[in-house]
Image (spheres, helix red, strand yellow):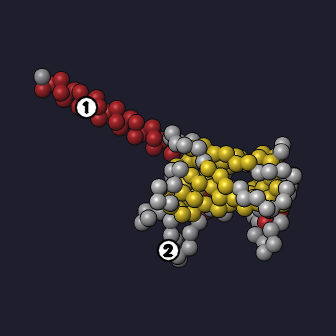
Amino acid sequence: MRRTSSALTVALCGAALGTADRADAATAQCTPTLPTRYARPTATPSAAGFNYGSAGLRVQLGWPNGRLAAGILPDGGSRATVEEDGSIHAKLGWWRGVPGKLRITGRRLDAEAPPLDAHVPAGYGSRGFQPTGLVFPSAGCWRVVGQVGDARLTFVVKVSKLPWH
């Protein structure tokens, strides 16, 4: 009987390690999108201040190495906040080169999670600058897709919580 218990314990531990290894491999495979050019944000938003995308739709990817760390930074600032429910909220600026309403969707690539929630406020016209709020339900590797008319932009971001949060 003892021999069966030992074999079962080894099998269960091996299965658990296999699951953890697969999760680690999926996380390691997250390749965040990096800006395609250098762009200095300007006091008055213009297409030149957005560093990733095309003439139809651009975004300002300002996270170091494509990694969005949520929480209070050592200097007191933040790039994203962790909400009471554990979700992560970040602001992101877009530039619409074509007319229309910006729609944003997103999904986690490395694990099951509810979809990204995006807030696109009205009042910014049909072209040009569009601020947004993105709510990631959990940390992980996320693909975000923005679309205005036929213009479509996709990027990947690795979302995490700062360890002291």
Residue 24 percent location from the top left of the image: 45, 44
Can you tell which of label 2 and label 1 is closer to the viewer?
2
SS type, badge 2 = loop
Label 2 or label 1, whichever comes before in sequence order: 1
154 relative to 93, above or below: above
Mark 2 and mark 1: span between their CA atoms?
A: 44 Å
Q: Which residue position holds label 2?
A: 74
Whether residue 130 is visible to the viewer of this picture, yes or no, is yes
Task: Between residue 93 and residue 84, name the one nearer to us.
Answer: 84
The quadrant the N terminus occupies is: top left
33 relative to 26, above or below: below
At a point 61% along the width and 60% down the height, the residue shown is 90
Task: Between residue 46 and residue 34, name the one nearer to us.
Answer: 46
On residue 10, which mark appears?
1
- For label 2, the crowd category at 10 Å Cα-Cα, with few meaning under 14, some 14 to 19 and many 20 or more, is few
Task: Between residue 132 and residue 50, name the one nearer to us.
Answer: 132
- What is the three-letter code of the residue carrying label 2? Pro
Q: Quadrant of residue 17?
A: top left
Callouts 2 and 1 close, C-beta under 8 Å: no
SS type, badge 1 = helix
- What is the three-letter code of the residue carrying label 1? Val
At a point 78% along the width and 75% down the height, the residue shown is 43
Task: Between residue 105 and residue 62, name the one nearer to us.
Answer: 105
Q: In which quarter of the image is residue 47?
A: bottom right
Residue that protrudes farthest toward the bottom in the picture = 75
